[in-house]
Image: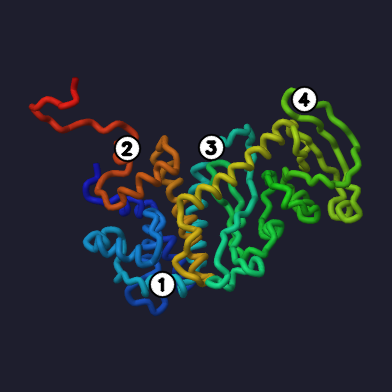
Amino acid sequence: MNTGKTVFAQLLEQLPLHQFRQCVKRYSGNYRVQSFTCLDQYLCLFFAQLTYRESLRDITTCLLGMQNKLYHMGIRGTIARSTLADANEKRDWRIYQDFAHILIHHARELYSKDSFGVTLQETVYALDSTTIDLCLALFPWAKFRTHKGAVKMHTLLDLRGNIPSFIAITDGKVHDVNALDMLIIEPGSFYIMDRGYVDFDRLYHIHQAQGFFVIRGKSNLMFHRQYSHPVDKTTGVRCDQTIKLSGPVSSVYYPGQLRRIKYADPAFLTNNFELAAKVIADLYKSRWQIELFFKWIKQHLRIKAFYGTSENAVKTQIWTAISVYVLIALVKKRMNLDITLYTFLQILSVSIFEKVDILQLVTNSAGIPENTYISNQLDLFDL
């Protein structure tokens, strides 16, 4: 049992801080900073995400209440609400974006061999976005509707481990399909999308880049059936067809053949003609993992109530939340813990200042605590 380091300090050891300092140097984050560095700011926000702090005053009050432990937590600067607020407003949010991508790279390496329910060697991604509502009066830069503000978090989720490999944060007016322009397509990989991403010009770009897509087709799709392939209807597959688009615009944007698979009610479109129809349907079913990812981070991390109103402060907080999610997944994998991310996060949140080894902490929490109290008196309810 480690009695010398707090749980927070042990989590800090899992962070590649030398790479964090490189990110800070890249954007001159500590330029003319005397006491409260970018690392101090990151650790304060990291603490806030782990322990569900609701405001800047809440963060500083809790940390100052543990003043004698701050040095061992890695926080060297003087903590004040105004100092933390200024740092969120002025420190470049790309520092925390780049650091989150570093953690994502490490996590994807660890989870690269994991299964996600479909036996497939290729990398499989789910692409979707979630909208985070904001008050337009407080966040005037976050354009969405006439009287409503919002930001969108466009996410490409690696289904092996449910690790986000790409995230773009835009205002709410940016349509989901524009995220396809930001992606670097990996040849041989699968991209699973809902029908909001039906844009045949962009889908053909994926095809030309030798990537595969599985997307839910729209009900008004205009096409000509060229071939029908035999299917086993006991698996739920209704038809497996080779088609060509016949719409006046879509046929120009996507001149090649497509495969149309109808499974129960929805019909899917894909440019992969090798996999069985049932496998394609199972791939689309696995897209639900990205919905669970959005639900998880919205419920268990602080990305719906923000500590600042500027675009820089909002993006800093979101990227810090993402890095916390990825770090928790990293530590869970490295320690080979057989618990859910939610359970692990809950245990950490109430034990952050405890001086106990994380593995021992999780083991004790998973089992029934032993009664170490010894008394010669009889138990009143021992009948």
Residue in the image at 81% along x and 45% along y: 219
- Dot 2 or dot 4: first in sequence order is 4
Name the secondary structure under disc 3.
Answer: loop
Name the secondary structure under disc 2.
Answer: helix
Residue in the image at 37% along x and 70% along y: 37
- Dot 2 or dot 3: first in sequence order is 3
Residue 153 sits in quarter: bottom right
Mark 2, residues whose alpha carbon is within 10 Å: few (<14), some, or many (≥20)? few
Q: Residue 233 carries which label?
A: 4
- Dot 3 or dot 4: first in sequence order is 3
- C-alpha gap between disc 4 and disc 1: 60 Å
Q: Residue 114 carries which label?
A: 3
Q: Are marks 2 and 1 in contact (CB under 8 Å)?
A: no
- Report whether 156 appears left or right of 60: right
Q: Which mark is residue 85?
A: 1
Q: Is residue 237 above or below residue 182?
A: above
